[in-house]
Amino acid sequence: MPHRILHIIIISIFISLGALQSQNVHFSRYDFQPLLLNPANNGSYLGSYRVTAIYRDQWANLLPNRFSTPAISIDAPLGFSFREQDWIGVGVNFYQDRAGAGKLTTTGFNGYLSYHLALDKKQTNVLTIGLTGGSKTRKLGNVNDFIFEDQTSGIGSLSLESSGGTVFGAGILYKTSINETDEFRFGVAALNLLPLKYQLTNSSNEKEIPEFNIHAEGSFELAEGLALEPAVVYQIKESMNLGYGQAKLAYSLDDDKNFRLVGGLGYRLGRAVQVLAGIDYQGWRAGIGYDLNTDPLSPAQSFEIGMSYIGKIYKRPKVKEVILCPPF
């Protein structure tokens, strides 16, 4: 048994090192982290501000607490632009991805700026251009805590200093309101466009590879109080491609309070089934996602939990004071 645990630790460390080129920060519930998917999602909603947060625990059934990713975003549409029917969005995002027993930690902090161009006065068709910029660093944990088969402690060639630099990305989003209940969104984003190298070993370095995201989402009313919400996401990063298709049903219990129950299924490339569930209440949304790899040789599982809140701040109307003088 000790040898089995030792082998798992060693494999996990090398998985961490290999993650430099293969491991993407990704989620099955991008609806709880839309800014990481496409910077053009920044400020694209009905409300005054939005807070989203998500936590992903990957391979929990095989290597507990080895692969985890928390992320949080705040974005808001501003009340001014070049045209009355347009608006500008701003936002920030923070995430930290931890991979393997070697605790390879990727930390990102990004700012977002977007311009939403209404193609008609009623804002039924909107074209958005979004930009993002910030920092991205990677750092290995204290590998000296692990003892290897040759009885040595740690790997002498590894650097324990953080390494990284500036990142930049851009995206475009088209949103159309088909009618009062149905809408469709399509977007494309290009991330990690600046040259960035990580120096995690004393003898070599690894570079960040550009990432391209293509996504489409919709909401279509099937019957009164029942809506279908499909979503497709495809991510391209050199030879490492990820993607999924999902279909959720949302049943409204109270239209006035926007009280809905949401559930559905998805399929991720690489033979993984997704189970999705959630609840919406007024401005709050909460949801979970569960990925089960259907390959019997690697029955890895992943779990996600997310929450978001859209706040609405209304200005009080200015009522002109009227003094009534009764006749005498």
Image (cartoon, helix red, strand yellow):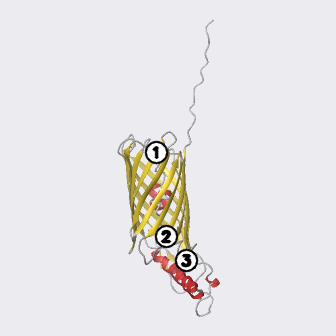
Q: Cβ–Cβ below 8 Å for labels 2 and 1?
A: no
Query: Mark 3 belongs to which amino acid?
Result: Gly
Q: In the rendered structure, find residue 180 and report the number of the disc placed on it.
A: none
User: Residue 113 in the image: x percent, y percent?
Assistant: 49, 55
**Residue 194 seen from this side:** yes
Towards the viewer: 39 or 11: 11
Figure check: 57 above or below 90: below
Indicate the quadrant where residue 137 lies. Answer: bottom right
Spatial CA span between label 2 and label 1:
30 Å
Quarter holding the C terminus is top right
Q: Residues within 10 Å of mark 2 (few under 14, many from 20)?
A: some
User: Residue 239 in the image: x percent, y percent?
Assistant: 38, 75
Q: In the rendered structure, find residue 301 and report the number of the disc placed on it.
A: 2
Labels in figure, total: 3
Q: Residues within 10 Å of mark 1 (few under 14, many from 20)?
A: many
Q: Which residue is mark 3?
A: 100
Towards the viewer: 220 or 210: 220
Tag 1, which secondary structure? strand
Q: Residues within 10 Å of mark 3 (few under 14, many from 20)?
A: many
Towards the viewer: 272 or 190: 272
- Dot 2 or dot 1: first in sequence order is 1
Residue at (52% x, 78% y) in the render: 16
Q: Is residue 82 left or right of residue 157?
A: left
Query: Mark 2 belongs to which amino acid?
Result: Gln
- Dot 3 or dot 2: first in sequence order is 3
Spatial CA span between label 3 and label 2:
15 Å
Q: In the rendered structure, find residue 252 and report the number of the disc placed on it.
A: 1
User: Residue 82 in the image: x percent, y percent?
Assistant: 45, 45
Query: Mark 1 belongs to which amino acid?
Result: Ser
Which mark is in front, 3 or 2?
2
Q: Is residue 215 left or right of residue 26?
A: left
Outermost top residue: 328
